[in-house]
Image (spheres, rainbow, N blue to C red):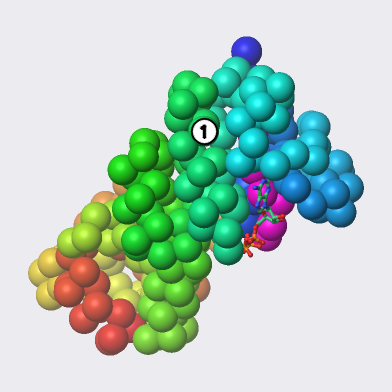
Amino acid sequence: MAKQYAVIGMGRFGTSVASELYEMGYEVLGIDTNEDKIQDAVDFVTHAVTADSTDDNALKALGIRNFDVVVVAIGADIQASILTTLILKELGVKKIVVKAQNELHGKVLTKIGADKVVYPERDMGIRVAHNLISPNILDYIELSPEYSMIEIVANHKMVGKTLQETDIRKKYGCTVMAIKRGEDINISPLANDRIDQGDILVVIGKNDDLQTLEEEA
Ligand code: ATP
């Protein structure tokens, strides 16, 4: 059977997670204390329920245990977010994903058993900062504290050259993992593949090395 998801908190983040899962064909239960939010959610979740997730009986009554993944997308009310996570853990939910407001909140969530903690505002801030260094940086994903992946539009120094001639590996110590060209994506580029105007390179490397590449992009 397809996985079943529950999303608690129908703010901007929760709504985005829930509607994407629903569009991909999964069953999604949306929960919020706010009735207006639940009214709006009816269009993009399978079931929408008004309930307070800090009330363990309410969560029990919804059969929250039976969901494969529960996403806690409560933002501002840190206490409610922590309490909800704790209750979900006690009820034996298999996988709990929680949105954290800040590092300290995230640490507490991990300590009480959240399986995954996400920081959407922080991550988006990081992406925007990299895009500000150069508008050619389309995306930035941290892989570990030391390594990241960027998407970069080929600049005039790269266009017309083969991958090897760009010297990205030799000069920056970074690896081009894929080349996007319109709708096409070459996922195993070879040293003699040539870069066209408008190509987007997916590059992986050490943060310092990527920064040098970004600054020259
Ligand atoms: P976003 O940035 O995603 O819009 P936010 O960080 O502003 O969210 P809030 O608006 O504080 O976060 O919370 C998101 C939603 O969670 C709100 O719609 C709120 O009504 C709901 N919420 C808050 N506490 C609870 C609770 N105890 N049970 C269920 N829903 C709750």
Measured from the top left, where is residue 91 in percent x and y?
Answer: 51, 23
**Residues in magenta, as a range:** 6-12
**Which residue shows up at 46% across the image and 57% down it?**
100
Q: Which residue is mark 1?
A: 87
User: In the picture provided, is 94 more to the left or to the right than 49?
Assistant: left
- View quadrant of ligand 1: bottom right
Measured from the top left, where is residue 82 in percent x and y?
Answer: 48, 47
The answer to whether any part of residue 117 appears in the image is: yes
SS class, disc 1: helix
**Which residue shows up at 21% across the image and 69% down it?**
207
Measured from the top left, where is residue 168 in percent x and y?
Answer: 20, 70
Hey, which quadrant is residue 178 in on the image? bottom left
* Residue in the foreground of this view, choosing between 202 and 60: 60
* Residue in the foreground of this view, choosing between 120 and 205: 120
Mark 1 residue crowding within 10 angstroms, few (<14) / some (14–19) / many (20+): some
**Which residue shows up at 22% across the image and 60% down it?**
145
> Is 9 covered by the magenta stretch?
yes
**138 versus 53 height, above or below:** below
Q: Is mark 1 within 8 Å of ligand 1?
A: no
Hey, which quadrant is residue 36 in on the image? bottom right
In this figure, what is the number of numbered marks?
1
**15 versus 27 height, above or below:** below
